Image (spheres, helix red, strand yellow):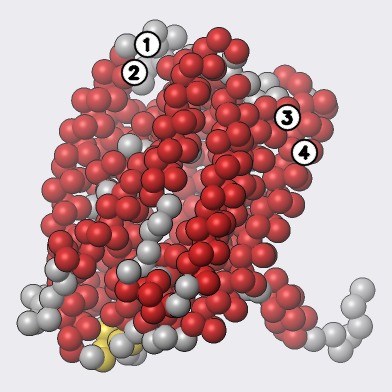
């Protein structure tokens, strides 16, 4: 027991300082930790209440919906980066609206209106693409007695509606409302977990997708309407004379991010659909469940640098390069270090789980295969912290590297996995990230050793 005069607040503050956590990182990490706790619970409920083939459809649905990155085209990251530059000269007043330099506010409105129009049009296109393309994809395979059509159509419609909300989240993050967005995501993860769990316990089977999709749209709409209504009204007003040129200012940065995100689809969201195509729904479910844990651990590690991109961007806009470099170096070490520890713990825990409970554990990949995904993600974490630095400078030098890795992974999986078995996919994932991490780090070293002004303006 601690002594009676023990100062809990002081101890907590020291712990947060040791871990390098500010409020934004703590809030984002809390969300990831909640998912890390609720994720395994949801998985256990799936093991008990879903058949293996239904599990495969569940994760394949999420994977196919992930094709929205091809229509999103990196615009969200561009909104965040460019709004952080304008927010350097703005601030929120007590009423939750922006005040400060008029030209910056005008440019912010101009940026948001372009983004809002784009996402509205693409949201409609996404709905049609998902419904039609998904129907062709899933109907081309035996359904194994799974009534997947209605859940798929409802899930597609809700995904498209949620897609149109993307500019609001990107704008809030660019305006350094990281803590508020992270707090929302914390409660959204709780609500999503509760919805999914109740549906599974009620024995709804694959229809869990229907209710979880509806809630995943209703909750953010209600939050934005209640919390950020005044900001939405302000930012939707016509801009002034100072406006953002999408072609001159954004497109050169955006197309690179778009290429990055599209190529990552095959290395993340597209894994379950790829496995379904090559090996069927049971293997798809194993890969989907295993990789979900990998992404959750990676998401926690990623927090140390990802949430600071807007603040580093604001510092870079003011020429505060010493502060940017020092903050990034410390955050990057903590991010990669946590990733190594987390992935190691997961593989060991999975090995123990498969030894103690081989039946339920069969819903995951074997630990020997999961280790391939874990090693690959550790290598990717080195790449990620490098990208977060360059994005703070509004640079995206890794586009062609991403494309090369994505194409290599997809080609190797199709050529080798069908002949050598499903265990090949995780180790191909690890193999393609070995040279990628080394190249990414060398590119970063070159950027950091050049003058900051050249890095920013080139």
Q: Quarter holding the N terminus?
A: bottom right
Q: How many marks?
A: 4
148 relative position to 360: left or right: left
Q: Earlier in the sequence, mark 2 or mark 4?
A: 2
Q: Residue at x 29, y 41 (%)?
A: 70
Q: Which mark is residue 138?
A: 2
What is the x, y in percent for residue 404?
43, 38
CB-based contact (under 8 Å), mark 4 and mark 1: no
Q: Which mark is residue 367?
A: 3
Residue 20 in sight here: yes
Q: Is residue 372 above or below residue 5?
A: above
CB-based contact (under 8 Å), mark 2 and mark 1: yes
Q: Is residue 95 above or below residue 152?
A: below
- Of badges 3 and 1, the one in the foreground is 3
Q: CA distance from mark 2 to mark 3?
A: 29 Å
Residue for badge 4: 349
Residue situated in front as seen by the camera: 421 or 402: 402
CB-based contact (under 8 Å), mark 2 and mark 4: no
Q: Residue at x 55, y 10 (%)?
A: 419
- Of badges 3 and 4, the one in the foreground is 3
Q: CA distance from mark 2 to mark 4?
A: 34 Å
CB-based contact (under 8 Å), mark 2 and mark 3: no
Residue 186 in sight here: no
10 Å crowding of disc 4: few (<14), some (14-19), many (20+): few
Residue for badge 1: 141
What is the x, y in percent for residue 61?
39, 30
- Of badges 2 and 3, the one in the foreground is 3
């Amino acid at each position: 027991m601690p002594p009676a005069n023990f100062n809990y607040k002081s101890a907590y503050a020291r712990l947060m300082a040791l871990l390098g956590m500010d409020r934004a990182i703590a809030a984002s990490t809390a969300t990831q930790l909640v998912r890390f706790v609720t994720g395994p619970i949801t998985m256990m409920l799936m093991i008990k209440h879903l058949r293996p083939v239904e599990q495969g459809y569940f994760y394949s649905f999420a994977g196919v919906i992930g094709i929205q990155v091809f229509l999103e085209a990196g615009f969200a990251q561009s909104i965040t980066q460019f709004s952080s530059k304008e927010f350097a000269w703005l601030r929120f007043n007590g009423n939750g609206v922006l005040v400060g330099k008029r030209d910056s506010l005008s440019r912010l409105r101009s940026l948001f209106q372009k983004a809002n129009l784009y996402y509205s049009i693409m949201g409609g296109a996404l709905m049609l693409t998902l419904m039609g393309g998904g129907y062709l994809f899933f109907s081309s395979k035996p359904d194994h007695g799974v009534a997947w059509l209605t859940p798929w159509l409802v899930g597609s419609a809700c995904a498209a509606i949620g897609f149109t909300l993307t500019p609001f989240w990107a704008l809030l993050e660019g305006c350094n409302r990281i803590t508020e967005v992270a707090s929302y995501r914390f409660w959204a993860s709780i609500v999503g977990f509760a919805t999914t769990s109740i549906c599974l316990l009620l024995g709804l089977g694959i229809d869990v997708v229907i209710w979880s999709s509806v809630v995943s749209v209703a909750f953010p709409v209600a939050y934005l309407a209640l919390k950020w209504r005044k900001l939405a009204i302000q930012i939707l007003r016509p801009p002034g004379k100072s406006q953002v040129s999408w072609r001159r200012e954004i497109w050169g940065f955006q197309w690179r991010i778009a290429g990055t995100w599209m190529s990552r689809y095959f290395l993340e969201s597209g894994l379950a659909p790829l496995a379904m195509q090559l090996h069927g729904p049971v293997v798809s479910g194993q890969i989907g469940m295993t990789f979900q844990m990998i992404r959750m651990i990676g998401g926690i590690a990623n927090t140390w640098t990802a949430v600071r991109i807007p603040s580093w961007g604001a510092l870079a806009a003011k020429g505060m390069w010493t502060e940017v470099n020092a903050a990034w170096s410390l955050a990057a070490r903590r991010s990669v270090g946590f990733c190594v520890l987390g992935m190691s713990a997961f593989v060991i825990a999975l090995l123990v789980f498969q030894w103690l409970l081989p039946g339920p554990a069969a819903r995951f990949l074997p630990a020997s295969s999961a280790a391939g995904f874990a090693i690959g993600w550790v290598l990717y974490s080195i790449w990620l912290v490098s990208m977060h630095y360059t994005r703070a400078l509004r640079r995206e030098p890794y586009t062609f590297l991403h494309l090369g890795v994505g194409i290599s992974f997809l080609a190797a999986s199709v050529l080798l996995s069908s002949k050598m078995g499903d265990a090949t996919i995780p180790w191909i994932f690890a193999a393609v990230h070995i040279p990628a991490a080394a190249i990414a780090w060398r590119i970063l070293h070159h950027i950091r050793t050049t003058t900051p002004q050249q890095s920013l303006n080139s």
